Amino acid sequence: MYTPATLEALKRAEKEFVFDKFDLTDAHDLGERLWRDGQTEPKPTSIRIVLDDLIVYQAFLPGTGEDNNGWMNRKCATVSRTHHCSLMAGVERELFGAKETWQNDEEHYAFKGGAFPIVVKGEYRGLVTISGLPHLQDHRRLTQTIAEYLGKEPILIPVED
């Protein structure tokens, strides 16, 4: 399903989608955009933003619940551990195999799209995650909203069937 081009596109997105600053106001503004954009999707989403190890924004659109919370927990754990988007962990595992024990731990980590690091001037500060859509759509919705927030063009992630 994934190719080296998938991995390169994810790396490009992580390099491009960085913040000059990110504070509580930014977290609220980005969270509200994700809330608004989530209402245009065919299925409801849940949203969480973590800044400096503190959940600073969290919302559940009607129709989401504990399952979404569990997915967000696992996606957050993946990004917190790697400082890379959760989809990258899945792509690397598929392309190169599991190199470390945690990469086989699907109870605590998610290897799916939908969580993205918050990097401010080269420093990892936290993450933003959504859950509710099929995972590649979670990634698309999340990164499109981040790109819009930053005033940048989205980066499409190529995959093969």
Image: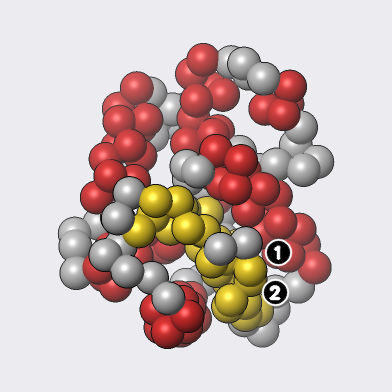
Residue 148 x %, y %: 26, 70
Left or right, residue 136 beside residue 99: left
Secondary structure beneath dot 2 equals loop
Q: Is residue 130 visible?
A: no
Task: Say whether marks 2 and 1 touch (CB < 8 Å).
Answer: yes
Q: Residue at x 45, y 51 (%)?
A: 124
Quarter holding residue 37 = bottom left
Mark carried by residue 103: none
Is residue 141 in view? yes
State the separation of the CA atoms marked 2 and 1. 6 Å
Numbered disc total = 2
Q: Position of residue 28 (x, y in %)?
A: 47, 83
Q: Quadrant of the C terminus?
A: top left
Q: Quadrant of residue 107?
A: top right
Q: Which quadrant of the figure has residue 58?
A: bottom right
What's under tag 1, amino acid-wise?
Asn
Q: Measuring 26% from the left and 40% from the top, which residue is drawn there?
A: 12
Amino acid type assigned to the residue bearing label 2 in the image: Thr
Q: Any mark on residue 64, and which?
A: 2
What residue is shown with label 1? 68
Q: Residue, x 72% and y 29% (percent of image)? A: 102
Nearest the viewer among 66 and 124 is 124
